[in-house]
Image (cartoon, rainbow, N blue to C red):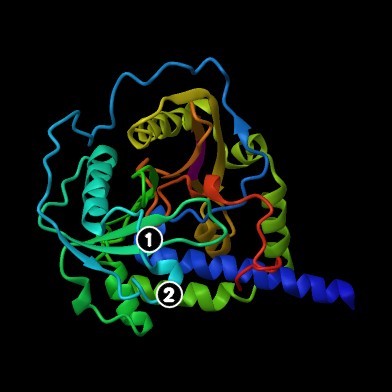
Amino acid sequence: MKKTKGKETLKVVVASALAIGVFSAALIGANHLAFAAATNGTQVIPAAVTEVPASAPQNLPPNGFQTPDLTVIGSPALGQHANNTASASAMSMEEAAQIGAQYIWDVFGESIDGMYVEMLFSSVPSHSRALWIGIVFPDNPASMEANDLQSRAHRAHNELYRFAIDAVTGLRVDISPGFGYVPQPSYEERQALNETLSVTMRISDEQMAWHIAWEAMTTAERMTYLGLSQSDIEPYLQAGREFARSHFNNSTVVYTTESFNVLHNIIDRFATDTAGFGGIIFSVSDDTGREAEIWINAGTRCLRPGLGIRTEHNDFIPGFSYDRPGGVG
């Protein structure tokens, strides 16, 4: 009986992962979806790669940033809770938005002049730093109702970028492209995805076993399974190095700390019983020991919408528990 219950629990976990993957596919297109598998068995890159890349990303101008004209507005959640109320030591949200604009320029080579930036302050007990979080829209997000699934999808398709910075120092924490630059799927594509979801939510024992086996694979084993060589991965590693250099603007990237893991395309696996290459998670640290995880899509070698470059995990307080005496939650 316990075995059956455990098996059903695993099916729920895999089904939930698939549901997230299918929803993401509806936003970014099934051809570019690569659901994030667990990062166990990360491949360490040979230490011979130690030099700073000689060239910037193709879409990254070497200079020329100009302070943009922005409309900065507070998130509806700003000030609604103690965790979302800006502290006296925090910079203004207008200043934070301009730092975010420079961040976007450095990573993507794009100006957000004339855009709307919705700002939210976040200070939670589990983190060692407070953040200003910004979402960039081409139009006023206040005009976009987000009370149902269709409205939330409409809002998501108008998000151009997200960023997070330290609310006091301006340190760059996270950045990602939004879904606004990605074409929305057609009606037929949405129908196909809905059909895939309705079928694949009924996960077979074989599918569940494959997913669990994939999670247990090392990076080398995943590469072998997908038919990938180190030379196939190298362009993605180079892209990761360039994104890392753009992110760490006040420190030096230590390339000897590089590692990566391979992702598969979850839609391919559950829709066609095959698994395609979905991209990589590239990890590297700077000379302060801060690690960046950089999520890179297959094919395009662009940052993954909603994930991009992430360093917030460095700010989790070790051993923190909301259930501790005096904890919140």
Percent of width and height locating residue 95: 22, 51
Is 232 or 301 nearer to us in this picture? 301
**Is any atom of residue 204 visible in this view?**
no
Give the amino acid type for the residue marked by disc 1 in the picture: Ser
Percent of width and height locating residue 33: 44, 56
Q: At x 45% / y 31%, what residue is drawn?
A: 237
Q: Is residue 251 left or right of residue 178?
A: right
Percent of width and height locating residue 43: 61, 33
The vertical placement of 145 against 179, above or below, is below
Residue on which the image places disc 1: 87
SS of the residue at dot 2?
loop
Q: At x 74% / y 68%, what residue is drawn?
A: 205
Numbered disc total: 2
Q: At x 16% / y 51%, what residue is drawn?
A: 112
What crowding class fits label 2: few (fewer than 14 Cα within 10 Å), some (14-19), or many (20 or more)? few
Magenta range = 279-283
- Distance, label 1 to label 2, CA atoms, is 12 Å
The vertical placement of 301 against 20, above or below, is above
Magenta span includes 280 = yes
Residue on which the image places disc 2: 81
The vertical placement of 176 against 13, above or below, is above
Is 107 or 287 nearer to us in this picture? 287
Give the amino acid type for the residue marked by disc 2 in the picture: His
Outermost residue to the bottom: 148
Q: Which of the two labelled residues, at mark 1 and mark 2, occupies the earlier sequence position?
A: 2
The answer to whether the residue labelled 1 contacts the one labelled 2, judged by CB atoms less than 8 Å apart, is no
Q: Is residue 41 left or right of residue 141?
A: right
Is 12 or 328 nearer to us in this picture? 328
